[in-house]
Image (spheres, rainbow, N blue to C red):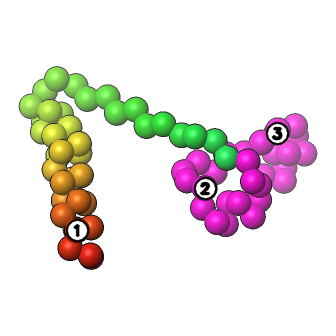
Amino acid sequence: MLQDGFHDGLAEYNFLGGAEPWKLEWTKDTRRHNWLFIFSGGLRARLLHYVKFHVVPHVKRMVSRNGR
């Protein structure tokens, strides 16, 4: 598919995500990626926002402190 795309004039393909070692076998060029999260004002969305940006980071910190 990529070969056909480049044959048809595709200039580049972005695998997205971080600079994984297997990706760096293809190229040394990397790009910064940003995330954008948009939540509605409803209760469910506010709860999801709280869990994503408060509870999950807290749990990750606790796990990393315990060496797991």
Q: Which amino acid is tagged 2?
A: Ala
Q: Is residue 53 visible?
A: yes
- Residue nearer the viewer, 68 or 49: 68
Question: Hey, which quadrant is residue 49 in on the image?
Answer: top left
Residue contact between numbered discs 1 and 3, judged by CB atoms under 8 Å: no
Q: Which residue is mark 2?
A: 19
Mark 2 Cα-neighbour bin, 10 Å: few <14, some 14–19, many ≥20: some
Q: Nearer the viewer, mark 1 or mark 3?
A: 1
The residue drawn where x is 40% and y is 32% is 36
Q: Position of residue 53 (x, y in %)?
A: 23, 42
Q: Earlier in the sequence, mark 2 or mark 1?
A: 2
Q: Which residue is mark 1?
A: 65
Question: In the orientation shown, which residue stands out farthest toward the left?
Answer: 43
Q: Does dot 2 land on a helix, a strand or a loop?
A: loop
From which residue to which does the magenta span run? 1-29
Q: Is residue 52 magenta?
A: no
Mark 3 Cα-neighbour bin, 10 Å: few <14, some 14–19, many ≥20: few
Question: In the orientation shown, which residue stands out farthest toward the front?
Answer: 65
Q: Main secondary structure of the magenta part?
A: loop
Residue 10 tag number: 3
Answer left or right for 15 relative to 59.
right
The residue drawn where x is 67% and y is 47% is 30
